[in-house]
Amino acid sequence: MQKDKISIPVIRRLPRYYRFLGDLLENGVNRISSHELADKMGVTASQIRQDLNCFGGFGQQGYGYPVEGLYQEIGRILGLNHQYNVILIGAGNLGKAVGAHMAFEKRGFRLIGIFDNDEEKIGQTIHGYTVMDAAALEAFFSDHTVETAILCVPRTAASELAERLYRLGVRSFWNFSHYDLAMRYSDVIVENVHLNDSLMILCYKISDHKDTQTLREK
Amino acid sequence: MQKDKISIPVIRRLPRYYRFLGDLLENGVNRISSHELADKMGVTASQIRQDLNCFGGFGQQGYGYPVEGLYQEIGRILGLNHQYNVILIGAGNLGKAVGAHMAFEKRGFRLIGIFDNDEEKIGQTIHGYTVMDAAALEAFFSDHTVETAILCVPRTAASELAERLYRLGVRSFWNFSHYDLAMRYSDVIVENVHLNDSLMILCYKISDHKDTQTLREK
DNA sequence: TAGATTGTTAATCGATTAACAATC
DNA sequence: TAGATTGTTAATCGATTAACAATC
């Protein structure tokens, strides 16, 4: 039973819990204490207990947490039992990679179409999906319900495309384009994957680490 | 002049500032106040002033911040003026996408090699780079200095590979593999891009939003 | 029962926001 | 000078950690 609103920092940790619990499950571990799990994950036991308690006492005093039950519960909280229809726009390198990922990944989403506006790419087959002409989006929507769109298009194309998809009823985006979809509409859900930002942060970490070393040497 | 240690939340915002400032620069904007920028970015002016002050008073009272100076400064803080040598391991769909990205992206890193252990992929050309046999990594390191490795390999291969690269001297990783490289060594820098985690979070946001709507309707 | 470990409250820590004096 | 906007201190808010009573 879920209490109140779960905070975003907690949510962002759930997939990681899910991953570790999946591992334990595979290794035949039935139960685990917050301390054991904390050691494995490199976090505090306190945080784990707080986090897990956001969605109701799942553990048992003196015993720990049931691995499978917890795994299932986190999956349920994340909504992985759903099957949202999703389309992918942009069949470039990144689009292909993400498309392959989606074709394989069944939890939560079902990929039902790939689009591009490049003549070269239209008609190509990616993991069993034939790339369709982006000009035919409106026609496609007339007989498909699409929950989510994945944007793997250049920065310059993103804004107009998002607008168009919004008008067609799309209210959630997995955004890989180097553009801030952000909050032009209040009812739109966006999850960004900005590879460039991530790379810059890596660059910072390396540079910062080197600076620190250099300082120490002096 | 940089004060003390800049906190991680601030650092994670820098690439976004950098992006917006780059935009302004392209549009010929010379100066901007914290309020204007805050409006554009959907954050508070207070936060912007606090953030920018971490690396010394760059603005001018009554005037605002110089766009170009700030842009350059953030680039410098992020270490984008460096040129770290990087290799990519794994030439699957994702590896190809990331390789293309790195071949194009010059800031901070220079891609100097792509490796895979799949016979099919070895010898292929990706954006001008010939995929080399991962078995030849040791030989490659004997006449190249490699700062960073990008891991686009399956979960199962990641652990052993990271170990091997560590022994060869690699101390920073851009990790796309579905595996927690984490902190087995204290001197290793890792930036993770877990696409699956991101997708799960999108799934949560959608499901949570729908739940909230349903509740309201009742 | 004794030992272990949770659930939960309280304490601490850090990050964000607000306010305003300094100053261009 | 007057107006604007920063730099910076103080107040608030939220998240993490610590502590411990409840309980299996």
Image (cartoon, coloured by chain):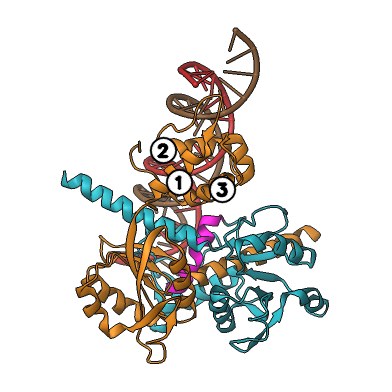
Chain colours: A cyan, B orange, C red, D brown
Is A192 included in the stretch rendered in magenta?
A: no
Q: CA distance from mark 2 to mark 3?
A: 19 Å
Tell me the chain of label 2. Answer: B
- Have a look at marks 1 and 2 and say if they share a chain: yes
Ranked by sequence position, the earlier of labels 2 and 3 is: 3
Query: From the image, which quarter does the C terminus of chain B lie in?
Result: bottom right
Which of these two is toward me, A195 or A183?
Answer: A195
In this picture, residue A11 sits left or right of residue A205: right
Tell me the chain of label 3. Answer: B
Callout 1–callout 2 Cβ contact below 8 Å: yes
Task: Give how far across and how far down residue B44 sits, in percent.
Answer: 58, 39
Q: Nearer the viewer, mark 2 or mark 3?
A: 3
Q: Please give the range of residues in magenta.
A: A7-20
Task: Give how far across and how far down residue B120 sits, in percent.
Answer: 41, 91
Is A8 included in the stretch rendered in magenta?
A: yes
The residue at which mark 2 appears reads as B54
The residue at which mark 3 appears reads as B20
Residue B5 visible in the snapshot: yes
Residue type pointed to by label 2: Cys
Residue lying furthest left in this view? A218
Which of these two is toward me, B28 or A48?
Answer: B28
Residue type pointed to by label 1: Val
**Residue A33 quadrant:** bottom left
The residue at which mark 1 appears reads as B10
Mark 3 Cα within 10 Å, few/some/many (few <14, many 20+)? some
Callout 3–callout 1 Cβ contact below 8 Å: no
Ranked by sequence position, the earlier of labels 1 and 2 is: 1
Mark 2 Cα within 10 Å, few/some/many (few <14, many 20+)? some
